Image (cartoon, grey):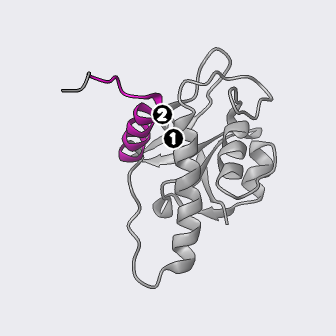
């Protein structure tokens, strides 16, 4: 009958997006939770965007779309999801709703703290992991949170 066709770039991209969605997980919405659903939708969209940047190189001061530093990745991801954030991790923490660890959800921001203040930020992916742009020489990746010295913030 017809000749065998190779998958187009579009269909391969669609499959990759479906795999990313499966890896990130879906959000189940409760009836009557419209305000939470809207916030959750923005956060899960930002999480999905950050995950789509897997493998992008770290570059200090970069805000995308091909290179990122830690706060540049969160800034880029939320901007693409429809919310603006300030530039630095500390400014981002100050602009979020602060939440306890027990209330964290996928798409919340995770801020890493030391005696000098906030030094790093990532997007919570669930199961104790974050998407982040770690450091010079590394790439955007999914990684387990390595310390208990973190604070959580939700983008309103």
Please name whichever residue, 81 or 109, is drawn nearer the observer in this view of the structure. Answer: 81
- Within-10-Å neighbours for mark 1: few <14, some 14–19, many 20+: many
Compared with residue 32, is residue 16 higher up or lower down, i.e. above or below?
above
Query: Which corner quadrant of the image does residue 42 belong to?
Result: bottom right
Identified at 77% across, 47% down, the residue is: 90
The picture quadrant where one finds residue 71 is top right
Residue name at image x 41 percent, y 47 percent: 21
Which residue sits at x=70%, y=30%? 68
In screen coordinates, is 154 left or right of 3? Answer: right
Residue designated by label 2: 142
How far apart are the two marked residues, 2 and 1, measured between alpha carbons?
A: 6 Å
Mark closest to the chain's N terminus, 2 or 1: 1
Q: Position of residue 81 (x, y in %)?
A: 64, 54
Q: Are marks 2 and 1 in contact (CB under 8 Å)?
A: yes
Image quadrant holding the C terminus, namely bottom right
Callout 2 secondary element: strand
Residue 124 point in image, percent of width and height: 52, 48
Residue 124 shows in this picture? yes
Residue 136 image-quadrant placement = top right
* Residue with the most extreme bottom position: 32
Q: Give the magenta range.
A: 4-22
Image-based side of 143 in relation to 6, left or right? right
Residue designated by label 1: 130
Looking at the picture, does residue 122 appear above or below residue 108? above
Which residue reaches farthest left?
Answer: 1
């Amino acid at each position: 009958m017809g000749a065998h066709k190779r998958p187009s770039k579009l269909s391969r991209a669609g499959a990759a997006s479906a795999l990313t969605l499966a890896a990130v997980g879906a959000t189940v919405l409760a009836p009557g939770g419209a305000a939470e659903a809207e916030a959750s939708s923005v956060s899960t969209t930002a999480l999905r965007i950050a995950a789509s940047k897997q493998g992008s190189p770290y570059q200090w001061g970069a805000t995308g779309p091909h290179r990122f530093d830690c706060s540049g990745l969160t800034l880029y991801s939320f901007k693409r999801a429809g919310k603006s954030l300030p530039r630095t991790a500390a400014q981002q923490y100050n602009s979020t709703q602060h939440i306890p660890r027990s209330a964290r959800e996928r798409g919340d921001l995770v801020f890493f703290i030391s005696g000098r203040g906030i030094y790093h930020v990532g997007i919570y992916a669930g199961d104790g992991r974050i998407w982040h742009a770690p450091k010079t020489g590394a790439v955007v990746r999914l990684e387990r949170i390595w310390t208990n010295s973190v604070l959580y913030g939700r983008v309103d």
